[in-house]
Amino acid sequence: MNNNRTWYVQGIRDGIPIFLGYLAVAFTLGIAAKNAGLTAFQATIMSITNLTSAGEFAALGLITSGATYMEMAITQLVINLRYCLMSFALTQKLDSKLPLFHRFLVAYGVTDEIFGVSVSVEGKLNPFYTYGLTSIATVGWTLGTYLGVVSGNVLPARILSALSVALYGMFIAVIIPPAKENKILAGLIAVAMATSSLFTYLPIVREISPGFRIIILTVVIAGIAAFLFPIKDEIAQEKSYAA
Amino acid sequence: MQHNVYLYILVMAVVTYLIRVLPLTLLRKQISNITIRSFLYYVPYVTLAVMTFPAILSATASTWSALIGFVVAVVLAYRGAGLFKVSVGACLMVFVLELFV
């Protein structure tokens, strides 16, 4: 049990960059929520129950335009479908004998950032690590939303701008170290960033929404890599998503 | 607004949670197929790389400060700095640069 506690504390510690990044992003979300006519209470409830940035930003637009509940459901499905892919990868990181309720709790915190940091753990994932990350991340996300609604100008634009790179910095800290020792990973990361740039700037393909861009590129690139460079079984067993 | 905001929030929360929870609860067994395992091994790296670049370039007030913040993060991560250092290092770099831009 003491082990769980250690993992939880470690999760909170590693979650500080997520906290900072979420605070900044949620702050702008709160401002948008206010403009969409939501009260501070409503916006806070939305953030604590959803814990997703793109989905919530899109929802505000739908709420303002008075969309149907079905439209809301489909939009959320499309925008957040990438979480399905992440949960699919994450489920293999958890011990198959783990009591089921842990899986229900871990699911709440499947965001880009919490997923990214959780999979970077060497070997099996102790769910308490994810709980630590989720705890502090949720505070940042919810608090940021609330503050954004009640006071549009608490944080100067300069600080918001700087904090906005916190989440990306974290992603980089997750993917670069393993790529140092693994040329295939390094190549994949380069290819992923290059194709992502093409899909962002080239005509026609840039019309694809960011959510689908992530899904399509991940499935195609990771799929091709899986055929061309199947991993050695013992690596997959012991060091899957080696940190 | 004719629709109820709380109902909207409920619909969003249920859909989003189902997306997250279904794979985690329905696929509990270890997959033995080596291709699928390799695929899942590569997924996080590709996803995070796709999400980071070029999105980071439009995250800050100027493309240049973001680009340099990105380079600083990569160098720090390559030299073995942890999550916190890389992340805060990139933030500080952007902050300092934007003081002069």
Image: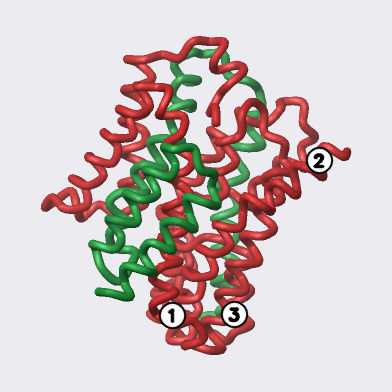
Chain colours: A red, B green
Name the subunit of mark 2.
Answer: A
Extreme-top residue of the structure: A233
SS class of the residue under badge 1? helix
First in sequence: mark 3 vs mark 1: 1
Closest to the observer: A154 or A220?
A: A154
Q: Are discs 3 and 1 less than 8 Å apart at CB? A: no
- Image quadrant where residue B12 sits: bottom right
- Judge left or right: residue B27 versus residue A2: left
Neighbourhood count class around disc 2 (C-alpha, 10 Å): few under 14, some 14–19, many 20 upward: some
Q: Where is residue A122 in the image (x, y as percent from the top left)?
A: 61, 29
Rounded to the nearest whole Å, what is the CA distance between mark 3 and mark 1?
A: 11 Å
Q: In the rendering, which numbered label is found on residue A32?
A: 1
Do discs 3 and 1 belong to a common subunit?
yes
Query: Which residue occupies 60% across, 53% down?
Result: B17
Rendered position, B33 above or below A110: above
Relative to A25, A216 lies left or right = left
Q: Is there a contact, CB below 8 Å, between mark 2 and mark 3?
A: no
Question: Which mark, by number, is residue A146?
Answer: 3
Asked if both marks, 2 and 3, belong to the same chain, the answer given is yes
Amino acid beneath label 1:
Ala
Q: Position of residue B97 (x, y in %)?
A: 31, 67
- Give SS at disc 3: helix
Residue A85 visible to the viewer: no
The picture places residue A171, in percent across and down from the top left corner, at: 45, 46
Relative image position of residue A34 (x, y in whole percent)? 48, 86
Label disc, if present, on residue A4 of the rendered structure:
2
First reached walking from the N terminus: tag 2 or tag 3: 2
Q: Which residue is drawn at 65% across and 54% down?
A: A134
Please tell me how crowded label 3 is: few (under 14), some (14-19), or many (20+) other residues with Cα within 10 Å: many
* Amino acid on which disc 3 is placed: Tyr
